[in-house]
C-alpha cells in the first residue's frame, strides 16, 4: 500500500513540476477553441477570405457578374441542406430586383482554416467560415437574417458552400 501511495505522490509531483508549455500543447488537442486547429492553421486575412468578401460585396451591390466570377462553374450550394447549382442560387438577384428589395450586409467574424491533409471525398484543404447579417429593406419594412456560411475553396474559386439561416425573414419581406 505504501508503494502505491508513493507512486501517486511521485506522479503528482512530476505533473505539478511539468512546464506550462507541455500542458498547453496537450490541452490544444482537446480544445473547443476554433483557433486551435490540430492539422493546419487558422488565419483571418488571406486571398481566400478576400474571395468570400468579394462575393458578399457583389451580393450587396447587386453585381451578379462579379458574384458569379467568384465561384467555380460546377459549384454546389447546400442552402439549408437544399443542394443547388450556381444558376439556381443566382435567382436571389432577380427576386430582389423585381421586389425592390435593398440589401445591406453586416459582416461578423470571417476566418480561413487551411488543413494539412485534403478532405477524403473532394480534396479540399481550404475552408472560409463566416457569420453575417443580411438586412433587407423594402419601402418602410426592414428585416434581418443571420447567415452562417462555410465555403470550400480550390484553385482560387469557391467550389462548395454550406449555408444555414432562417428563411422566414426573406420570405416576409418579399411578400
Image: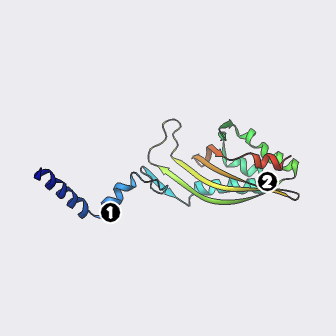
Q: Nearer the viewer, residue 3 or 163?
A: 3
Residue at the (57%, 51%) spot, across then down: 128
8 sits left or right of 137 in the view? left
Q: From this viewpoint, is residue 73 visible? A: no
Q: Give how far across and how far down residue 59 sits, in percent.
A: 74, 53
Please, is residue 103 above or below residue 166 in the view? below
The answer to whether residue 48 is left or right of residue 138 is: left
Q: Quadrant of residue 87?
A: top right
Instruction: Residue 62: give its label.
Output: 2
- What is the crowding at mark 2: few (fewer than 14 residues within 10 Å), some, or many (at least 20)? some
The structure residue drawn at horizontal position 40% and vertical position 51%, both measured from the top left corner, is: 30
Give the secondary structure at mark 2.
loop
User: Which mark is in front, 1 or 2?
Assistant: 1
Seen from the viewer's position, the closer of residues 8 and 130 is 8
**Residue 143 visible in the current orientation:** yes
- As drawn, the label of residue 21 is 1
Numbered mark located on residue 31 in the image:
none
Residue farthest to the front, as pictured: 1
Lower sequence index among marks 1 and 2: 1
Q: Looking at the picture, how far across and down is residue 14, in whole percent?
A: 21, 60
Tell me which corner region of the image, top left, top right, bottom left or bottom right, holds residue 11: bottom left
Amino acid at each position: 500500500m505504501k508503494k502505491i501511495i508513493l507512486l501517486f505522490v511521485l506522479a503528482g509531483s512530476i505533473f505539478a513540476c511539468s512546464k506550462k508549455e507541455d500542458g498547453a500543447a496537450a490541452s490544444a488537442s482537446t480544445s473547443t477553441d476554433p483557433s486551435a486547429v490540430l492539422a493546419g492553421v487558422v488565419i483571418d486575412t488571406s486571398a481566400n477570405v478576400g474571395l468570400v468578401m468579394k462575393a458578399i460585396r457583389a451580393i450587396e451591390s447587386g453585381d451578379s457578374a462579379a458574384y458569379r466570377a467568384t465561384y467555380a462553374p460546377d459549384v454546389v450550394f447546400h442552402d439549408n441542406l437544399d443542394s443547388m447549382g450556381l444558376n439556381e442560387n443566382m435567382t436571389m438577384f432577380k427576386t430582389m430586383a423585381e421586389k425592390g428589395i435593398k440589401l445591406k450586409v453586416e459582416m461578423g467574424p470571417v476566418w480561413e482554416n487551411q488543413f494539412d491533409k485534403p478532405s477524403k471525398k473532394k480534396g479540399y484543404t481550404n475552408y472560409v467560415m463566416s457569420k453575417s447579417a443580411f438586412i433587407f429593406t423594402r419601402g418602410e419594412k426592414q428585416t434581418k437574417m443571420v447567415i452562417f456560411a462555410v465555403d470550400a475553396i480550390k484553385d482560387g474559386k469557391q467550389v462548395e458552400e454550406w449555408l444555414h439561416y432562417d428563411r422566414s425573414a426573406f420570405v416576409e419581406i418579399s411578400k
